[in-house]
Image: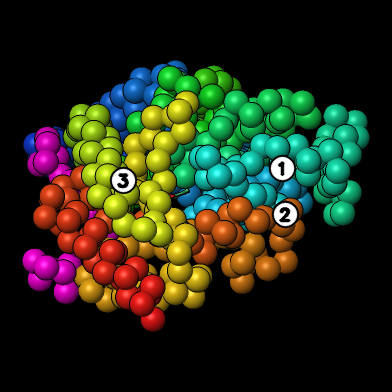
Amino acid sequence: MTGSGRAIPNAVPHLAGNEWKYLKECLDTNWVSSVGPFVDRFEREVAAYVGVPHGVATVNGTAALHVALLAAGVQPGDEVLVPALTFIATANAVSYCGAQPIFLDSEETSWGLDAGKMAEFLSRECVVKAGQVVNRATGRVVRAVLPVHLYGHPCDLDAVLEVAARYPLAVVEDAAEALGALYRGRRVGCEGLVSCLSFNGNKIITTGGGGMVLTRDDALARRVRSLTTQARADGIEYVHEETGFNYRLTNIQAALGVAQLEQLDGFVEAKRATAAHYAEALARVPGVTVFTEAPWARSTYWMTSALLEGPRPTDVRALLRGLMGAGVGARPLWRPLHQQPVFKAAQAYKVEVATRLYERGLSLPCSVGITAEERAAVVAALADGLGKGASE
Ligand SMILES: *Cc1c(COP(=O)(O)O)cnc(C)c1O
């Protein structure tokens, strides 16, 4: 166990604002289900925060990605470019559309999609036929690209947008981990055709479970709203012209969301302070480098991650297990998706950096409410683990 004898979680919710008050309001007013004033308010306030006209709340972030991809025109048999270094949900949403992911590499600065390799893949491996990008190896249409803003740090989106516009490919942003981050002074989640958020329990703000689709495009917002509400074309006679989904967020969940959003800026400050603390303390520990933000980024540090340059990859695994066994909620980075059994048949193009990051990386406990003593215990446990590895 850690010095205090208590486990230090990786990232747990911080419910310190108006959550009780707004939940009580739902129960007192009988608005508990999939419509209600908090749903409208949450959609309006998140969209305003990010700076887009439309927000459509969804049951979770994965559902948001699913309907965003459909609305972006992804069809069965299509292909979508996805960074290999991300949570499985990013690529699962592609599968739900009957499409296939093609896994691309990350770059070192942001840990996000490498636009240079994306351009290389498109020029070497694809041809443009009748305005469509066709993958030479499979003959399938590459319809969209799904950049991910990883661990609270924006990817280099301008570079991705520039390459995508040349073809063109639809840009669907997975901003599930990066609400509150800034990319070149702009809020993350407002640049692509459409972007998606998650409010799962471990995300920077939570509704228990939830997500949102954000867009500037009026028609796309209407289509997303339709798809999330069983694609009901007529509200009285219940006429349905296509297969929709029941992907709505409930008023109870949205009530939590409104209360959480009020605290978001403070949460970002707390996460940034934790990252700064780890960076400073671990600068004195040889063999470990904290992942810090690019000059053009303001990260939320949803996760504080670090790379272990000293130990061999197998020793990194042992160290991770040691930390977790001692009650320190460290986590590996996302296992690159081309290494996942479920995607073993998927195409991957020169995924190298992502694999190295995975082999050497870990994320440290960084709940909004983490204490100075807990952070010190994490640093001590990590330094101890690294010292052991070196002396063996
Ligand atoms: C959390 C997450 C999602 C999915 O969100 P859920 O709300 O858990 O469905 C998608 N993409 C990334 C990168 C995530 O971290």
Q: Write down the residue under mark 3.
A: 279
* SS category of the residue bearing label 1: helix
Among numbered discs 1 and 2, the one appearing first in the sequence: 1
Q: Amino acid at mark 3?
A: Ala
Location of residue 315 in the rendering, given as x and y in whole percent from the top left corner: 44, 74
Q: Is residue 325 left or right of residue 23?
A: right
1 and 2 marks in contact (CB < 8 Å): yes
Q: Is residue 207 left or right of residue 23?
A: right
What whole-number distance in Å separates the C-alpha atoms at marks 3 and 2? 31 Å
Q: Write down the residue under mark 2.
A: 350
Among numbered discs 3 and 2, the one appearing first in the sequence: 3
Location of residue 50 in the rendering, given as x and y in whole percent from the top left corner: 39, 24
Where residue 256 sits, quadrant-wise, is top left
Residue visible at 23% across and 33% down? 269
Q: Quadrant of the N terminus?
A: bottom left
**What kind of secondary structure does the magenta stretch mostly adopt?**
loop
Q: Write down the residue under mark 1.
A: 117
Q: Residues within 10 Å of mark 3 (few under 14, many from 20)?
A: some
Q: Which range is magenta? A: 1-20
Q: Is residue 325 shown to the viewer in this render?
A: yes
* SS category of the residue bearing label 2: loop
Q: Is residue 248 left or right of residue 195?
A: left
Where residue 18 sits, quadrant-wise, is top left
Location of residue 41 in the rendering, given as x and y in whole percent from the top left corner: 28, 26
